[in-house]
Image (cartoon, helix red, strand yellow):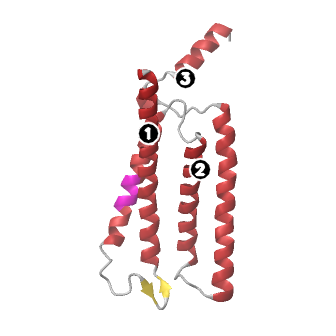
Amino acid sequence: MSLKSFDKFCERMILNEPGGQKEIFDERQNIMRSRLAIEALFVYVGLTFLNSMVMEMFYQWAESWMTVTLLFAVISLLWWEIRCAFKGCLLAVSGRYAQKYSAVMGIFIGALNGVRYIFDIGKEDYFVTNGKLSEDLVFALCFLLFIVNGIFMLCVMRHEEKMNESEAAK
């Protein structure tokens, strides 16, 4: 492969059509995203470990261990995205279409699955069952956090677009 054809290949990869765009991050973003992913993994493991100690030794505060673990996974994902946004490595150099699509799908899936739990709010043991948080409440919190996650992503994208527009106007 010649140098000229390699340049064309890279140009096609970066300037691809929006519908088929793939997220492309620069090297600094990849390194920061990896470090922050490890940090979020430590947050998840720490929360799960503390929860296991509390639920095993002191008081089982939720009906199911698995639902709480799922809640901690969603919290860790949100932690990772917030940290990436503040470090400037959440959004790709190109491929924003894929990121917008995943954010909208996160909102849609969270809302669609959360509807089941919202209709059960009037039910008798919805919040607390036998002195423990009910599974329905924890699942509803998980899906609510999925919606918050998608909205946060869209807000960060909109903020970045406004910053790019203001820089282009200068």
Which disc, if any, is residue 83? 2
Task: Please determine whether, in this image, residue 54 is positioned above or below residue 116.
Answer: below
Residue under the point 47% across and 91% down = 130
Question: Is residue 150 left or right of 84 when viewed as pictured?
Answer: left
The Cα atoms of the two marked residues, 3 and 2, are separated by: 28 Å
Residue range corresponding to the magenta coloring: 107-112
* Of marks 3 and 1, the one in the foreground: 1
- Rendered image: mark on residue 13: 3
Q: Which residue is mark 1?
A: 159
User: SS class of the residue under badge 1?
Assistant: helix
Residue 81 to residue 163: above or below: below
Please indicate whether residue 38 sits to the left or right of residue 153 in the image.
Answer: right
| Residue 127 painted magenta | no
Q: CA distance from mark 2 to mark 1?
A: 16 Å
Which of marks 2 and 3 precedes in the sequence? 3
Q: Circles 3 and 1: CB distance less than 8 Å? A: no
